[in-house]
Image (tube, coloured by chain):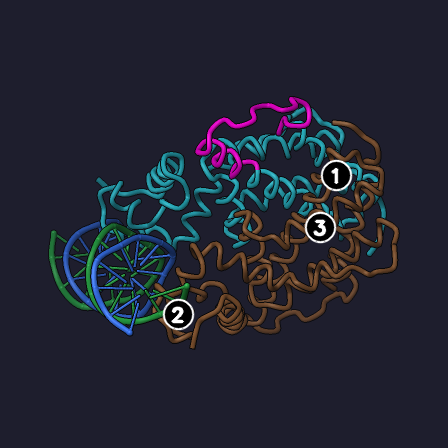
Chain colours: A brown, B cyan, C green, D blue
DNA sequence: ACCTGAACACCGTTCAAGT
DNA sequence: ACCTGAACACCGTTCAAGT
């Protein structure tokens, strides 16, 4: 049976979920698909490009915006929340997407930056600065979530010492929202500023 | 002659500067030092720990604060600027420090977070939230600078197409400062908020 | 067009054995 | 205490040759 891009990306995602990014190798993926490693290079130029396709698969739900027009603050808060949820839905999701974004291999991540940039423009940020405001938000979501996710894995291994010391300051979602709020406040203060 | 931790870290930094993070391997480092690869494992538990030591070496200048007491805004702006400068001083510096920070292997990076957290407290942010505000700033500096640095390397290879279209919107330092200002404004708006 | 098999040039880490 | 040598168990990528 012929190998298709979609099958490869699906198998790679399964490997990621089950064993993590460290065990997501071209050779192992090929073994899982019962093809030779070289076969993958007919469909993808290199590993980076394949990981980019996995990143885009993970990020699929993020760009589905509410069709009802919403104020810019809610659009930013919503996009951040959907992005974090998507990353947390896969083992090492934040790390993989971070790497693909940094390598310029994720089209979906570029779309997320556009979404946030448009919201920044609506907030009154000068168009030249809007993309940078958007990237600032993205760096936060990726950084926060990668940290959160790596702690989760560490806790899962190291077990249950000191569970829920303070439900308020220890709830990751509340902590996440605090940072998003800080960024929204920063964007509000930045309206119509020039470099 | 005996091998010391300091020699290893210095040689690793030289390798980083000359060939980049992709070519900074334990085996190559050992070859450069004219020891066997196994020798490195007497001094460092693993590669992550060694990279953490390199990160801390790179970050050495960042924590030297101005002895004259300064308002919290200037402390944040100054720390961000010194952090970016330190990262840009070494090939793939931002990528290496990012990875070490994410892996919890950089003591210097923890010190930077403390510095920024103290500034946030001075700004009026509730102590519980100050570290998160500090991390938000750190995620930005690491994300922005990694992006800036990877573009620099791409430009250096791909050569000089479209040089300096607009000196104002294209100056990386000005763009960097815009994001820092956004974060400072966000912290200002956040004073005394509670989760 | 699509894939195999074998090769090239590497990795990180461990550990008995040496000095 | 500190290091070597060899081994273990892998990597990503290329490419002539097959179907």
- Per the image, the residue denoted by label 1 is A130
Q: Which residue is at 64% across, 49% downward? A: A110
Give the residue furthest to the bottom.
A1
Chain letter of disc 3 in the image:
B
- Per the image, the residue denoted by label 2 is A30
Element at badge 1?
A: helix
Closer to us: B42 or B156: B156
Answer with the quarter of the image where residue B119 lies. top right
Q: Position of residue C6 (x, y in %)?
A: 20, 65
Chain letter of disc 1 in the image:
A
Q: Position of residue B171 (x, y in %)?
A: 63, 26
Indicate whether residue B156 is drawn in magenta.
yes
Closer to us: B169 or A140: B169
Left or right of residue B1, residue A44 in this image: right
Pointer 2 and pointer 3 on the same chain: no
The boundaries of the magenta stretch are B148-172
- Per the image, the residue denoted by label 3 is B132
Indicate whether residue B110 is drawn in magenta.
no
Element at badge 3?
A: helix
């Amino acid at each position: 049976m012929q190998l298709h891009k979609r099958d490869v990306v699906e198998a790679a995602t399964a490997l990621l979920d089950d064993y993590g990014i460290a065990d997501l190798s071209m050779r192992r993926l090929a073994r899982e698909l019962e093809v030779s490693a070289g076969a993958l290079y007919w469909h993808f130029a290199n590993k980076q490009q394949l990981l980019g396709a996995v990143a885009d698969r993970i990020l699929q739900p993020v760009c589905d915006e509410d069709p009802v027009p919403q104020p810019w603050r809610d659009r930013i808060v919503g996009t951040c929340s959907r992005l974090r949820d998507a990353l947390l839905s896969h083992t090492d999701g934040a790390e993989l997407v971070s790497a693909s974004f940094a390598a310029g291999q994720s089209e979906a991540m570029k779309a997320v930056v556009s979404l946030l940039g448009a919201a920044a423009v609506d907030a009154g940020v000068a168009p030249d600065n809007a993309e940078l405001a958007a990237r600032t938000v993205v760096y936060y979501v990726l950084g926060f979530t990668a940290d959160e996710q790596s702690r989760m894995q560490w806790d899962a291994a190291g077990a249950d010492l000191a569970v829920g010391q303070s439900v308020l300051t220890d709830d990751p979602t509340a902590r996440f929202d605090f940072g998003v709020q800080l960024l929204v406040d920063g964007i509000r203060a930045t309206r119509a500023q020039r470099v």
